[in-house]
Amino acid sequence: MKYTVSYHGVQSKGATIKLNGSKSISNRLLIIRALCGQDFAIENLSNAKDTTTLAELLAKVADGAELDAGAAGTTFRFLTAFLAFQEGSQILTGSQRMKQRPIKVLVDALRLLGADITYLEKEGYPPLKINKANYNGIDEIELPADVSSQYISALMLVAPYLSQGLKIKLKGEVVSLPYLLMTKNLVSHFGGGISYKDSCFTIQPSIYTARDFQVEGDWSAASYYYAIVAFEKPGYQIQLKGVGADSLQGDKAMVEIGEHFGVKTSFNGQLATLRKTHHEVNNNFDFDFVLCPDLAQTVSVMMAGLGVSGKLTGLKTLRIKETDRIDALRIELDKTRVVIDDHNQEDLFTQVGKSNLIDTPEFDTYEDHRMAMSFASLAIFGEIQINEPDVVKKSYPEFWNDLRSIGFNVR
């Protein structure tokens, strides 16, 4: 299946998009609610596939159950830690791509705490058989800080329910710190005793308290509209409903990044207005994405659309996402005569060139929602095709309909 996408711009100025609830916040809330054992309302819960999958699997947990997380990485990692301390035995599996995504760092950490986890196929990778842990009272572990923050967040979410609590010491440069601080704030909000100092999270034994919660809009989703505004004429604006200046999400860094590309953001409560200014865009852009790696694809496409060259760093975790995102960007932007070179480094690349949309380029998505949504904005410059467009359901099911509402033809 493929979509052909083009742009006519009618109805564009002054449009308002209601953003889906943050997937990252929603998934953490579902684990907290499951551990709490008491129901509480979650308003604006994400309808992303990853979140609905997690909710469905949490409802199915039972001795002997086989739980299929599909392609949902956060779901798989959070469930690995959650199931390790539940009664009975479960099998946790996923898609073929999931079986290629490493889980060893998290499994090793859980085993140190007494978890009984067995690899059913390749060592260090899903699927897993998870029996109830024989918790051994260890209250301190050390993890490399440059691994996926989801491993660390998974441990932080279950740690209040360990009788001795847990100290998680992080070695080296901490990547995706805002995601860890998001977890910390949510654990604290629901009554967990938690602190962070000198690259160490200290979680006290405690019990979550049921409290209703309003989920803010997804800043990762907001990033795609920054690209659209950046590509438009001065004066063009889009309003995004659901995101504010006081966000828990690290991807709010798009406000700062957007300034470089001539996009000014103003806030009125939970309403953000994005406006294209007359600011002349600098043709060189260097940025360290260590705190917000999920923005890298959007920004790379923004650079390509505007002919901005530069260097993107802090990208180590992009290699182990739904696909190798750096390699995927290199292959797809090459179709528009933009050159990406990773210089044989795992955590950075340089980029040169301006997109030339010749012969209706056909972009592959690699089972990666962010590839589809990042490249869609290039339709402002000419007709494009997106293969396997339904992959957006992983995080933003209404994406294509929302694009139609602001002047895109999607067929």
Image (cartoon, rainbow, N blue to C red):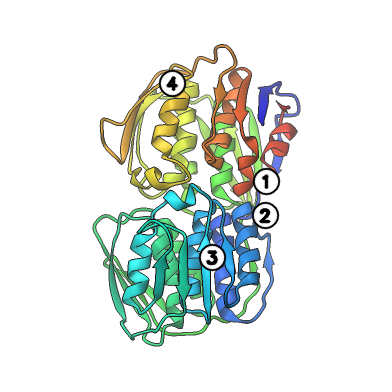
Q: Few, some or many C-alpha atoms within 10 Å of disc 1 (few <14, some 14-19, many ≥20)?
A: some
Question: For the residue labelled by badge 1, is the local secondary structure a helix, a strand or a loop?
Answer: loop
Q: Are marks 2 and 1 in contact (CB under 8 Å)?
A: yes
Decide which of tag 4 and tag 1 comes sooner along the chain.
4
Q: Look at the picture and state if 236 lies above or below 36.
A: above
Residue at 61%, 17% (x, y): give it.
Answer: 382
Identity of the amino acid at label 4?
Asp
Residue 334 disc label:
4
Q: Is residue 118 left or right of residue 17?
A: left
Tell me where residue 350 appears, x and y as whole percent. 32, 28
Quadrant of image for the C terminus = top right
Decide which of tag 2 and tag 1 comes sooner along the chain.
2
Decide which of tag 4 and tag 3 comes sooner along the chain.
3
Disc 3 target residue: 28
Quadrant of image for the N terminus = top right
Decide which of tag 2 and tag 3 comes sooner along the chain.
3
Observer-nearest of 165 and 91: 91
Decide which of tag 3 and tag 1 comes sooner along the chain.
3
Tell me where residue 126 appears, x and y as whole percent. 44, 58
Q: Give the image quarter of residue 81.
A: bottom left
Residue 397 disc label:
1
Decide which of tag 4 and tag 2 comes sooner along the chain.
2
Q: Give the image quarter of residue 8.
A: top right
Q: Are marks 4 and 2 in contact (CB under 8 Å)?
A: no
Tell me where residue 337 appears, x and y as whole percent. 44, 16
Q: Is residue 88 left or right of residue 334?
A: right
Residue at 54%, 46% (x, y): give it.
Answer: 220
Residue at 39%, 82% (x, y): give it.
Answer: 204
Q: Are marks 2 and 3 in contact (CB under 8 Å)?
A: no
Gap between marks 3 and 1 measured at Cα? 19 Å
Observer able to see residue 280: no
